[in-house]
Image (tube, rainbow, N blue to C red):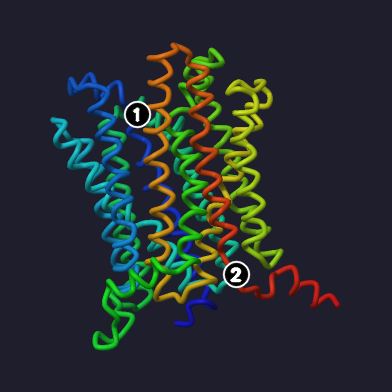
Amino acid sequence: MDKQNSRFRWVIFASVLFTYLIMSSQRTAPGLITDQLMTDFSVTASTIGLVTSIQFLVYTSLQIPMGILADRYGPDFFLITGTALTGAGTIIYSLGTHEAVLFLARILTGIGDATIWVNMILILSLWFNEKEFTRLIGFAGMTGSLGFLLATVPFSVFIVVLGWRGAFLSAGLLLCLCSVFLYFVLIKKSNESAVVKNTVPKERAPVMLILRKMLSNRQAWGLFLCHFGLVGGYIGFIGSWAVPYGMEIYGMTRIEASRLIMISLVGALIGAPLIGWISSCLNTIKRPYMVFHFAVLLLWSAFLFFQAHPPFYLLVVLFFLIGFGFGSNSLTFAAIRHSFPVKESGMVSGFANTGGFLSAVLLPGIFGYILDHFQATAGNIVQGYYYGFFTPVIFSLFGLIGVLAIKEKRVEGICEIKRKRRE
């Protein structure tokens, strides 16, 4: 089958993205039932926080190994297995009767979740050419934001109707069905083996040699920093401190503060596909990526300029634009597709994704430590948020350094091709 000219590639695209939508929703959905878990299991908030963070720690730690395995044995098997593991973990979570079961469930979910992005990127790179890939990677990024959006009001309604156990059980069963469907689409219908070896074993370079080669590559480190700078500020702050910030600084209710997250998600939903299209049209990844990195740095710096308390109308604009700028993070993987051979792109994608989620793990803790310090010493929460905002600013500065470090080779873009045809 000629993959990159087959109509079947759109079935692959839709199937993989729907799976990503459901899996990404289960990253944050447990946050909707924090109070219920504390009551049902008689545990403290710190225990629930540890249960939540364990999934992201597992996810982050497995990105590079997953990239190496996907490069070596192909992405299909790992995506199918990872989807099944996420489904199984979600089902166990819904049936748990002790906090230890919740830990086990979220570890399984983290292992499964670690397979989705790297393998999805590799599958799309095999089925679509470079120009299509640059455009479609934005839609993949948008799907992740849609998943976060799904885990807000829609899943809350689901919890009210079915109870939290019924809602998570249903999500787990749906993911197991997705795994079966992916097996049918990726293996049976495509007439491919589940495990594909890229090279003959005798010709295969040792893993440590490949890893050292990547870690000495300026392009790989530049893309690591790009993702580090964009993802941490958005997921780390928006996912952890945005609601408390709105409630404590602006006196909002929890629901009103949650709308700030919704506004930011809308920005990300619009930004991801639009920025991918702009990059493809302009025939460059680095220039638009550099513009958006610089813009995100200025947006976070605005919180410092206004002493952590910008006017409310500007606050809404800032949240929307930060979400919009976050949508450009998909260009990291478009740059990988253009810079590295397919047989190495899985490992590099895992390395870059590690940078993004490393910053997402670091930022909430750093921000919280700064808030605790100023509340304990000065008793001034506004001052605490002011100094806390230095964290995303510094992270964004690392991202800008990364995008300045990357190099790109230019090819004809869509707009140039259309212009030449008209001429």
Of residues 352 and 174, the one nearer the viewer is 352
Query: Which quadrant does the C terminus fall into?
Result: bottom right
Query: Which quadrant does the N terminus fall into?
Result: bottom left
Q: Closer to us: mark 1 or mark 2?
A: 2
Q: Earlier in the sequence, mark 1 or mark 2?
A: 1
Q: Quadrant of residue 71?
A: bottom left
Q: Secondary structure at mark 2?
A: loop
Which residue corresponds to mark 2?
408
Of residues 350 and 174, the one nearer the viewer is 350
Classify mark 1: residues with Cα within 10 Å, few (<14), some (14-19) or many (20+).
Answer: some
Q: Quadrant of residue 344?
A: bottom left
Which residue corresponds to the image point at 44% horizontal and 75% vertical from the top-left? 342
Residue 322: % across, % down: 59, 39
Of residues 113 and 220, the one nearer the viewer is 220
Which residue corresponds to the image point at 38% horizontal and 60% vertical from the top-left? 350
Q: Quadrant of residue 354?
A: bottom left
Identify the mark at residue 159; answer none if there is no mark. Answer: 1
Whether residue 9 is situated above or below residue 91 in the rendered picture:
below
